[in-house]
Image (cartoon, grey):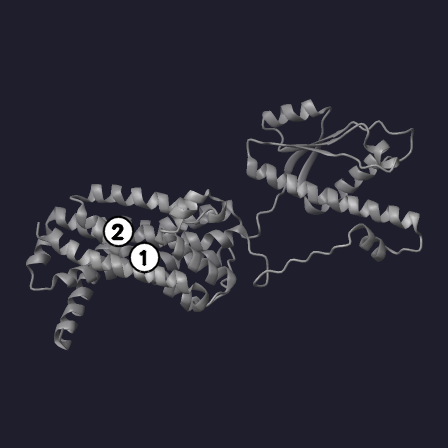
Amino acid sequence: MSNMGAKTLLSHSLRIAWKDLMELFRNRLGLVLLIVMPLFMMVMVGFIYPSNGGGLSDMPVALVNEDAGFGNSVLPSQVFLMGLQQINDQTHMLVLSNASSMADVKDMVQRGELQGGIIIPSNFSSSIMNGEQGTLIIVTDQSNPQISATIQAALSAVFNEMGTMLAQQNVQMLSPTINATNSLAVVKPYNVQTEGVVLGTPSYFDFIAPGIMAMTVMMSVMTGLPVAISQEKEIGTMDGMMVAPINRLSIILGKTLGQTARGLIQGVIILALAVGLFGVTIQGSILLVFGLLLLGVFAFVGLGIVITSFTKDQETAQMLMMTLMFPMMFLSGVFFPIQQMPWYMQSISQVLPLTYASQALRKVMVLGAGIPAISTELIVLIVFGVVMIAIAVPVFRRAMTR
């Protein structure tokens, strides 16, 4: 292709892209939805998964103290309850109340009045005073496995810490020459430290924000294409472009550029909300993030053109798009880690382009990765985009001659 022909092709493509963007800007409702949709999605998800870590707070938990004890002396169960109250006053993790029995606790959990309960059995103090382990029972709400597991893990950690403090005191009583530091080494010989790849402790929202960015770019491109192509075929404006003295490739490129701009606008809105409103820290290169958004648009726009070209009307195209998008939303690790899925679902996720777009954005934004660390994701997205565009061009040309 000569330089003059390339300039003409590019000029026609830019004009078609500008026409599509002007139609979007003239459509006030469409323009509002373009901005409101990512705003609504990020605000909704951002407050479900707060950027401050989203730890447990104000969980209603009942206490049942069945410990009989010995006379009027201070019981280990009383010491335990005072320690638990002291810790809870600092963390505000629980809203503690009293219950008469385990059956009473289970009944209140069933009615939704409690998230769980702590039972101190009748032999708790006697076991400890006889040099045996004192048993504590945690009652959880099994109808909500995630909250149940979180409460169980949090309470177990508190109880272990309190048990360690008691063991230190016992060691010091048995061996007065051992100081507090040495007694801790006797009770807990291992000191485990955790260090992340980057500084700080990312919240679950930091995990989910890159996936939402990739998902929104996909949805923007794939829902916009049926309007950009199918609607123009239905109202007849596409016929006008087809008989005009322009290359068919210019139409495809123009539509692609128009949807690219639309997808990038929504991607930038989500990125700005994530950083400005929810405090997401971008550990890697901001230019690389923008590059990945652009690559995500490129990867999905070819698929959108292929699907739209095969369908006869806008409604069918949108239905087919939604049929493809919903599985990708839930199988690509946007909301849930892929590693927690069954093995066959993990296998399916490996062939979805949204998986690689989400992983690449997450590595750059959360872990501060550079291009070498996301080379696999880049190759997959580029290859997928090139293959889809290569298929889209002849399919679109054939569809326009029908």
Rendered image: mark on residue 263: 1
Q: N-terminal of the two: label 2 or label 1?
A: 2
Above or below for 119 versus 33:
above
Q: Label 1 amino acid? A: Gly
Residue occupying image coordinates x 80% and y 39%: 80
Assess disc 2: are there few (<14), some (14-19) or many (≥20) residues with their C-alpha within 10 Å of its C-alpha.
Answer: many
Q: Is residue 208 left or right of residue 58?
A: left
Which of the 4 image quadrants contains residue 371?
bottom left
| Kind of element beneath mark 2 | helix
Residue 223: image location, x then y, percent: 28, 49
Query: Between 272 and 289, which is closer to the camera in this rendering?
Result: 289
Q: Are marks 2 and 1 in contact (CB under 8 Å)?
A: yes
Query: Between 259 and 194, which is closer to the camera in this rendering?
Result: 194
Q: Is residue 283 left or right of residue 312?
A: right
Above or below for 113 versus 312:
above
Q: Which residue is mark 2?
A: 224
Assess disc 1: are there few (<14), some (14-19) or many (≥20) residues with their C-alpha within 10 Å of its C-alpha.
Answer: many
| Kind of element beneath mark 1 | helix
